[in-house]
Image (tube, rainbow, N blue to C red):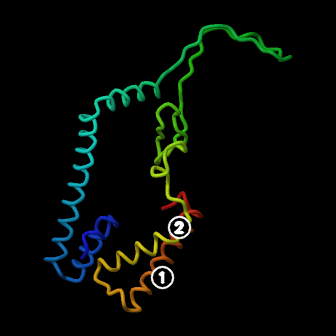
Amino acid sequence: MSPILGLISPFYLPVQGSLELASKNFTTGSTKLIFAIIYSLILGFSLTLGSDLAFIVMPNFRAARDQMAVDMAETFNIIGSYSTTNSTQYSSLNGTFGFQQLFVPDEPLPQYHYILNGCYRDPTWPLILQPVDWKFLFILVPVFVFCLASLNGQRYRGWKVWFMVAFGCCSFAGKLMFTYDLFSQS
């Protein structure tokens, strides 16, 4: 098994381990399941460690994060009176009016470039930080499938590798179309 495939597909190791357990290969199946559990724990620990190291290396990250949290929960109180500017027959409103800053989860806060759900990429950022244009997928997907087949031991001079590349590209295209049509469901 290629270690690259375990990095790309998060459920590859548990599925392979459970299939081996189902076929009564207890030693290899349990080993792969234990490895998948340890791998996920190490991955989670590494992400936490990387976040903490970022706060140590750049101390302004913590202040910026705290300021962003304060700005998101800020409430404005306005004292005064309001009256209608048209012909409505309501009396004027007097008192204190409180407004709480709310944000849409899919729209960024302009001063922080932060969104609640997803990954925000500012259009003014350089090209390297922008998402990959869909036209590049016609090149990247076959190259990726070919490299993945080569890493798994497939010879590149036979007809099987080209069948694998075609099947992988069709699978990706199907997944992409279903994602566009059924975006709210997994």
- Element at badge 1? helix
Marks 1 and 2: in contact by CB < 8 Å? no
Query: Mark 2 or mark 1: which is in front?
Result: 1
Where residue 132 sits in the image (x, y, percent)?
50, 58
Q: Residues within 10 Å of mark 1 (few under 14, many from 20)?
A: some
62 on left or right of 91: left
62 on left or right of 89: left
Considering depth in this image, is 181 or 6 the residue closer to the camera?
6
- Give whichever of discs 2 and 1 has the lower sequence position: 1
Considering depth in this image, is 134 or 41 the residue closer to the camera?
134
Q: Residues within 10 Å of mark 2 (few under 14, many from 20)?
A: few
Where residue 86 sits in the image (x, y, percent)?
83, 17
Q: Amino acid at mark 2?
A: Leu
Q: Residue at x 57, y 68 (%)?
A: 177
Q: Residue at x 68, y 8 (%)?
A: 81
Quadrant where the N terminus sits is bottom left
Point out the residue furthest to the right here. 87
Question: Distance from label 2 to label 1 (Cα)?
Answer: 15 Å
93 on left or right of 2: right
- Element at badge 2? helix
Vertical position of residue 155 compared to residue 173: above or below: below
Vertical position of residue 168 compared to residue 61: above or below: below
What is the number of callouts on the image? 2
Where residue 32 sits in the image (x, y, percent)?
20, 71
Q: Residue at x 28, y 41 (%)?
A: 51
Where residue 4 sits in the image (x, y, percent)?
28, 69
Vertical position of residue 98 compared to residue 65: above or below: above
- Identify residue for label 1: 166
- Identify residue for label 2: 176
